[in-house]
Amino acid sequence: MKIVFKNTLMISLLLAVSMISISAIGYLKAKEFLYEKFQDQAYDQLESVKGNIHIWTEGKQEVMEYIAEADELKLVETAKAAALGTRIAERMENPDAFAFMDAKGFLYLGNAKIPVNDYEHFIDGMNGETNAYDPVPSQSPELNGAPIVLASSPVYGSNGSIVGVASGGYPIESLIDIISNVKLGESGYATVFTSDGTIVAGKNKEDTLKKNIADYQNDELNQIVEKSMSGETGTIETVFDGKDSLVFYSKAEEADWGIMISVPVREAYADANSLLNYFILLTILFITVSAGISYLLNSRSLKPITHINSKIAELANNEGDLTQRLHVKRKDELGQLAGNVNALLDSLQELIGSILQEGEMLSGRTSDLSESAEEIVQLSNDVTRNVQNAASLSTEQEQGYNTNLTSIMEITETVSGMKDYSSLVYEKMKHAYEEVEEINQEIKTLINQMSSIQSSILHSADTVKKLGSRSSEIGNIVDLIKGITDQTNLLALNASIEAARAGEHGR
């Protein structure tokens, strides 16, 4: 895998890990923030419902307090009280709008006299309390069993004692409409229930007084009823109406009712989930763009390295051109690398040039040695001929003393000349051998220098090897010359011996 891909992959992985970590932290923080914001909205809606219930029930209680100030009631004139109830019912179009209960525990409604000693609103009224109570179905035919909320207030006589209770029943349809309009998010809604869990108002109007919280068969919801009735306010996550929901609960102030607002969890966290999707898309986009930019930057940064690598590859084969140079105009590490490579090429070119120059000088000296060897061979031939002549002269010594003596003198002089000439040849050969040794030493020095150069100058190594083989041939020539010298000395010795024998014979 190319380094540009490795760098791009590594940077992309690091960015991915960083962005995922940042996105995860951001999502958790955003989720927490949005949940708190959503929770604040839920509690605001709870307070709104509590406020609406408070206003509605307090209004009904104030009506009862106002009616309780009527003179007909203070004087306990039941007939007039019944007539007052009829007028109020007609004006309010509500047959349950008012009824008077005297201190003896009888309720006067029209011509009816109904005992109410055990009714809660009568007992509280006689105790001086003004209250609203849990809704009940209306008994009036005109209302067809519609749920009404009873409210009562004590009636004080002229002496300040309680002489009866003013009571009225009011349809809660208007309150149900108000509560039904309370929304949380898109589908969250409020539910109002009594202390026994009977639903007063909720998502469906038909559930009023006909459905109980216990019908959902959820112990956590039953606990909400208990906690809200005890005055607690809180939040739980549970299944409500078949959905995993967040339920916020509290208690009304003027009525003994509990309130809860439920919303599906997915909706509660919808903004957080949308933010998470946004983070995911942003992360993918950022990583993709960053990977592209990283690839381009790496490609551009590594382009000089690729150029340097190609030049070095050219030098590694047998066709390397040491005259080429890297043209990288940068002031960073890559520019320094290119400069160092160019300096290396300069050194190699200079070194190989010096090697070639020494090779040419060695070739010239080898030629000189070859010429000297040829001269030595020619001299050896002359010596051989002189020895042969000496032998011929020895066979002719019988021709006469004078002739022999002359011949012997000539031979002696010739042998002496040959000996001197052989010595001269030996000195030249010795001098030539020393020059060869110097050249060999120079070659060894060059070989030691070349050994530090890597495979990029294989061609030069081959040249040096060829020069080494030529040096071996020169050594062979030197050995031949030394052999010839030895043979010449031997011939000179033999000639002296023959001359002495000839002298003895001549004598």
Image (cartoon, helix red, strand yellow):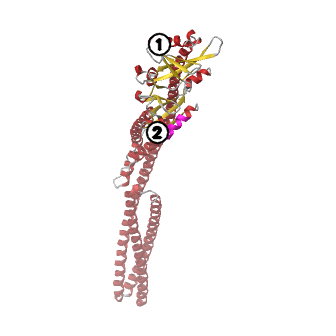
List the single residue furthest toward the right.
159
Which of 504/185 is in front?
Answer: 185
- Residue 403, image quadrant: bottom left
Which of 369/151 is in front?
Answer: 151
Residue 30 visible (yes or no): no
Residue 430 visible (yes or no): yes
Instruction: Specify the quadrant that holds the C terminus.
Output: bottom left
Which of 227/101 is in front?
Answer: 101
Dot 1: few (<14), some (14–19), or many (≥20) neighbours within 10 Å? many
Question: Magenta span: helix, strand or loop, mainly?
Answer: helix
Residue 460, percent from left and from top: 39, 57
Q: Residue at horizontal 58%, vertical 11%?
A: 69
Q: Residue at horizontal 38%, vertical 58%?
A: 458
- What residue is disc 2 on? 19
Circle 2: element type: helix
Magenta-colored stretch includes residue 438: no
Which sits earlier in the primary sequence, circle 1 or circle 2?
2
Residue type highlighted by circle 1: Thr
Residue 161, percent from left and from top: 64, 15
- What residue is disc 1 on? 86
Residue span colored magenta: 217-226
- Residue 506, image quadrant: bottom left
Q: Does 164 sit above or below residue 471? A: above
Which of 71/235 is in front?
Answer: 71
